Image: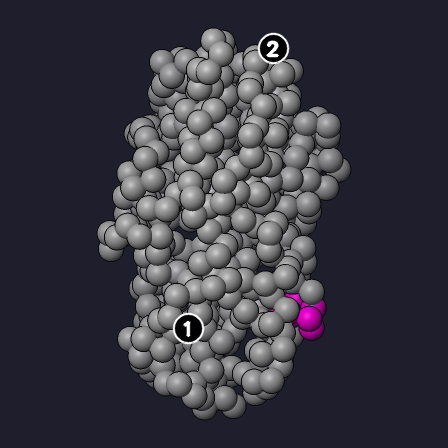
Amino acid sequence: MPSGERIRVVHIITTFSVGGATETALLCAAGLNATGRFEVTILAGPPNSAEGSLFDDAEGWGVRVDTIPALQRNISPWQDVAAFFQLTNALKKSGCAIAHTHSSKAGILGRMAARVANVPVIVHTFHGLPYTATSPVLQRVGYELIERCAGRISSGVFSVTRDILRRLREARIGAPERAWLARSGMDLDRFLRPDPGRDDVRRRWGVGPDDVLLGMVGRVHTGKGQDVIVRLAPEILKDAPKAKIAIIGTGPLKGPLEEQVARAGLSDRVLFVGGIPVNEMPEAISALDVLVHVSEREGLARVIVQALACGKPVISYALDGSPEVIVDRLNGRLIPPGDDNALRDAIAELVHNPQLREEWGAKGPAAVDPEFRAETMIKQIEAGYRDLLQDAGIACSASSGVQPFAEWLPSLREKPVSEGSTSLGNS
């Protein structure tokens, strides 16, 4: 490769719908482009209309995104075969040196396509695993077998959590010496020092200054936990007349859950506020008093990091990457997955104790800064790329350092975002 020529990289993700994995892939592409050493494009399946997309953000950040029409989340043999050939053709045309996949479906099809297209370096980021410790044995073994096979054609892998790295080693997926931690980075300063707007957001949502606002942020989808909170809402709110719940996000369960809340007569206290534009997320999280995150399966939800940076205590299931940033009774609560009694008790404790909310909230920023800064992620990804390119015999110029986020993507903080582009904080 001629000296000074940018190394071509293609990131592949299953869908360009709003979500944590999509935000991470997009931010990674923009950051790598900004180093001047890489030329990154993204291949993605069409977004789900109910979840919004990040196309406007990609355009604003100067990242090219090409759609793979057949690539979708659901398993569909004919569609998946078509997606494989579409990915293979796109990778061959790109002439890329690195194919970097994200999410389960794109991770399998994308790595297979990259192998057929003779891409020198094939890498995958695990934002989460497609199974949990409680998944049926056959399902878990099946997924591990598939990932083990994909690992054999991978040059290396990244993981957003140490927990995932440990589980990959235990399942003998990929080569341990070519597996790295790369946190899901973000513009952390916006959350550490959010712009004024808390009171305006609460007024817009119908939340008073003395109300205690519990918030959930994420795709309103099976397994994300909104149904748990809606089911428990009558009990949670019965003994806390000043408490309200804000459900931030869109998705297929939003309508049914709104109907369930209406039947319970709680529409004025359980608020479905819809999706929030990316550049308004700091103000939205700042409007909360407590973040509740009870997803059944998550690598490490970005919204947990964002809430801790904003100085908000977080209540989360003690699974996946949550214990890597939440210390029980120091900056939030970790509760056993599925334990409704523990969840109710944790919420009640924080709702009725403003001093505890303040004390625990104050400990949040130190748990995530600087580990989750965008520039930290870019350094981690770039270091892994250099090792893998060297393994493949491809020269890569030494890094001259990564500029602070505000310098390499100043337009992110200023550009308007369309109403259809929302940040939900989750994958």
Q: Position of residue 195 (x, y in %)?
A: 39, 66
The reply, left or right, for residue 174 in relation to residue 57 is: right
- Please indicate, yes or no, whether residue 154 appears anywhere in the rendered image: no
Q: Position of residue 27 (x, y in %)?
A: 44, 41
**Residue at the spot 45% in from the left edge and 73% down from the top edge:** 288
Q: Secondary structure at mark 1?
A: loop
Q: Amino acid at mark 2?
A: Gly
The answer to which of 325 and 217 lies nearer the viewer is 325
Callout 2 crowding tier (Cα within 10 Å): few <14, some 14–19, many ≥20? few
Disc on the earlier residue, 1 or 2: 1
The residue pinned by badge 1 equals: 287
The answer to which of 331 and 217 lies nearer the viewer is 331
The residue pinned by badge 2 equals: 393
Location of residue 254 (image quadrant): bottom left
**Residue at the spot 63% in from the left edge and 61% down from the top edge:** 366
Q: Which mark is residue 413?
A: none
Q: Amino acid at mark 1?
A: Ala
Q: Position of residue 259 (x, y in %)?
A: 32, 71
- Verify CB contact (< 8 Å) between mark 1 and mark 2: no
**Residue at the spot 58% in from the left edge and 79% down from the top edge:** 358
Location of residue 157 (image quadrant): top right
Q: CA distance from mark 1 to mark 2?
A: 51 Å
Residue segment shown in magenta = 328-335
Q: Position of residue 3 (x, y in %)?
A: 49, 12
Q: Secondary structure at mark 2?
A: loop
- Please indicate, yes or no, whether residue 415 appears anywhere in the rendered image: yes
Tell me: residue 240, above or below residue 417.
Answer: below
In the image, is residue 119 part of the stretch drawn in magenta?
no
**Residue at the spot 59% in from the left edge and 55% down from the top edge:** 369
Tell me: residue 377, above or below residue 369.
Answer: above
